[in-house]
Image (cartoon, rainbow, N blue to C red):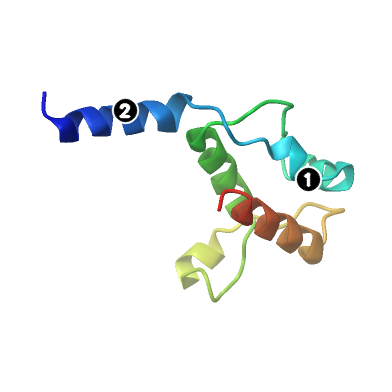
Amino acid sequence: MDEKKISSIISKERYYNERHINLKEIFNKEELQVLKKLGINIENKLYTNYEYECIEIDLFAYCDDKDLLSKEEVEITKPLPEGVSKEEYKNIFEKFCNCKK
């Protein structure tokens, strides 16, 4: 097996199995409650890159930013649930996206 294939296999293995993202440390209790209202439960564990991106997709489903999305994407976004303001969502979304950088 050549080095590129080995490197690719190792990268995939890390993507799915290496746990290194601690989301509980990033959000305060109020933000964790807002995430719960969005149907996203953050557990007290380290997340893989794959798990992180799955949560990111769930969170992105509520984004209605016309500058980021196409017209079709905006039309299929979920409305924010009662008790979650746009400002709360925006702050959590930005915090979530910046935590992996």
For label 1, the crowd category at 10 Å Cα-Cα, with few meaning under 14, some 14 to 19 and many 20 or more, is some
Q: How many marks?
A: 2
Give me the residue at 54% from left, 65% from top. 75
Give the image quarter of residue 27: top right
Image location (x, y in percent) of residue 68: 52, 70
Residue 61 shows up from this direction = no
From the image, which quarter does the N terminus lie in?
top left
Up the image or down, 7 lies above or below 32; here it is above
Which residue occupies the foreground of this view, 72 or 53?
Answer: 53
N-terminal label among 1 and 2:
2
Give me the residue at 48% from left, 72% from top. 71
Which residue occupies the foreground of this view, 78 or 65?
Answer: 65
Which residue in the structure is indicated by mark 1? 27
Image location (x, y in percent) of residue 49: 50, 37
The kind of residue tagged 2 is: Ile
| Relative side of 17 to 101, left or right | left
Image location (x, y in percent) of residue 37: 79, 43
Up the image or down, 10 lies above or below 86; here it is above
| Relative side of 29 to 24, left or right | right
Give me the residue at 37% from left, 26% from top. 13
The kind of residue tagged 1 is: Phe
Residue 51 shows up from this direction = yes
List the single residue furthest toward the left: 1
Which residue in the structure is indicated by mark 2? 10
Image location (x, y in percent) of residue 51: 54, 34
Give the image quarter of residue 63: bottom right
Mark seen at residue 13: none
Which residue occupies the foreground of this view, 52 or 88?
Answer: 52
Name the secondary structure under disc 1: loop
Give the image quarter of residue 85: bottom right
